[in-house]
Amino acid sequence: MEARAIARFVRVSPTKVDRVLRQIRGLQVERAHEILAYSPRPIAKTIGKVLTSAVANATNREQGAAPDQLYVKVAVADAGPSLKRIQPRAQGRAYAILKRMTHITIVVAERVPSYVEEPATAAKPAGRGEPKGEAKPAGRAAKALAAVRKAASKPAAKKKPAAKKPDAKKPATKAASKRETGAAKARQGRTK
């Protein structure tokens, strides 16, 4: 059984609210209240009110969940509308300021004890949805598999002998080649 509570148009940015909501997601309601009570962030008080409302919604239904069995199933901060304001700046410029709003949604659910068995899901009938044999790869995997099979089916090609490399080292850059040719010319001039 689930129950929810929503606070709409809260004048805080969604990122600031989400920092606090991350701390209480998945926790028991009592533990979440403790964390919110001692949180230094001002939005924690508003989130505590929303959580209290969600717990009250869960306990006041026909089935009436026990508050000690509830946990925070969903805690979300959705972006609301933004108020657009202008900040005057130097030389006639104007900077935009967005005053953000948030919709806070908290859903609490009853945690089922581990000793209670879940109802068995119906088995799927064997028919069209069942895979027959091996699954065929798609996309890049199919192309790679086809290339491997094609290469395996071809006879091995004879390798050509490698060409002999000249023993003379080539300079790495143009500047180095100019230096070497200049040095060679100077040596030739000395020997003459």
Image (spheres, rainbow, N blue to C red):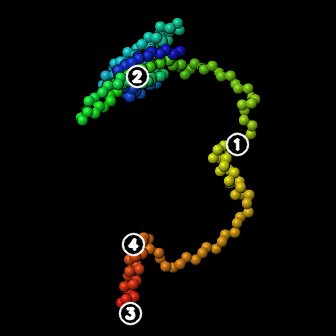
Image disc number at residue 111: none
Return the residue found at the far bottom. 192
Q: Which residue is mark 1?
A: 136
Which tag is nearer the camera, tag 1 or tag 3? 3
| Residue type at tag 2 | Pro
The location of residue 139, given as percent across then percent down, is: 64, 44
The location of residue 190, given as percent across then percent down, is: 36, 90
Image disc number at residue 175: 4
Which mark is first along the chain, 3 or 1? Answer: 1
Q: CA distance from mark 1 to mark 3?
A: 78 Å
Which mark is first along the chain, 2 or 1? Answer: 2
Decide: few, some or many residues near mark 3? Use Cα within 10 Å; few <14, some 14-19, many ≥20: few
| Residue type at tag 4 | Ala
Q: Which residue is mark 2?
A: 81
Which tag is nearer the camera, tag 1 or tag 2? 2
In this rendering, position of residue 58 left or right of residue 158: left
Decide: few, some or many residues near mark 4? Use Cα within 10 Å; few <14, some 14-19, many ≥20: few
The location of residue 81, given as percent across then percent down, is: 40, 22
